Amino acid sequence: MALLSTHGLTAQYGQFKALFGIDLQVDAGECVAIIGANGAGKTTLMRSITGVLRNAPEMIRHNGEAIGALQPDQILQRGIAMVPEGRKLFPSLSVEENLLIGGQVRKGSSRWTLEAIYTLFPILKERRHSPGTALSGGQQQMVAIGRALMSNPELLLCDEISLGLAPVVIRDIYAALPAIREAGAAVIIVEQDISRALSVSNRVYCMMEGRVTLTAPTTDVTREAIHAAYFGEAA
């Protein structure tokens, strides 16, 4: 049984249809990459999975149970947490307070504690009393990841976590993913940096204009296949 799956998932904003029959599967412990250009529907897919956009119940299943119509807080209680694009820290709170909020929303496994987050991202312990928005962009991204992990998720959704960051910072953030997976969480990476996404994932889905144009094991996918799926034309 898949940890998470979507079945003919559709989504729209008013009269604008954004997703057209998305079928996706994430198994326990694996990392799935979702790639595609701006406007491909990647963020809309994440918003649907997390309940921000409501769907027919059977369009999304978690551990075999239909969850498409649940509210975001109910999705989070089930162990699905998101690191949103843009980080969205609470500006009036310190680093540590931002992290602690993540730990208040779900009761369950306690593998991710403040100390575990500080071990994963040591700079956050040094800056724990600083306002979250006083940090660099990369450090803020670490806080956003840590906040999501504090809910001890089964599935962590990461929406464009490298966007706008320096390469050295991106390297450090991606270096944390193996530890996150070893602690038991499956991961979905939404990413425009194709090479980076493929380097950490087991399987890849490519989206274009609200449709999946390619799905393949990362080890089997070719540059030509990605080019064709990404741009909708032959390489």
Image (cartoon, rainbow, N blue to C red):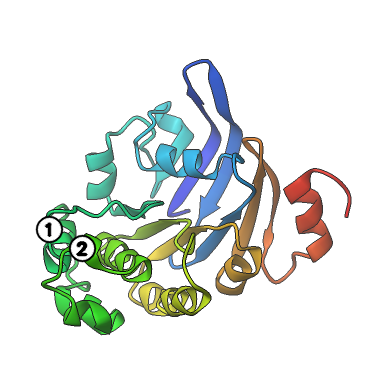
Circles 2 and 1 in contact, beta carbons < 8 Å? yes
Residue placed at 18% from the left, 80% from the top? 125
Q: Amino acid at mark 2?
A: Gly
- Using residue 205 as the reference point, say whether residue 5 is left or right of it: left
The front one of 184 and 192 is 192
Sequence-earlier tag: 2 or 1 = 1
- Using residue 186 as the reference point, say whether residue 71 is left or right of it: left
Picture coordinates of residue 225, whole percent (x, y): 80, 57
State the SS at label 1: loop
The answer to which quarter of the image holds residue 135 is bottom left
Q: Is residue 188 visible?
A: yes
- Using residue 145 as the reference point, say whether residue 134 is left or right of it: left
Q: Residue furthest top?
A: 15
For label 1, the residue is 93
For label 2, the residue is 132
Picture coordinates of residue 33, whole percent (x, y): 56, 59
Image quarter where the C terminus lies is bottom right
Residue placed at 30% from the left, 33% from the top? 70
Question: Is residue 85 shown above or below 220?
Answer: above
Between the C-alphas of marks 2 and 1, the distance is: 6 Å
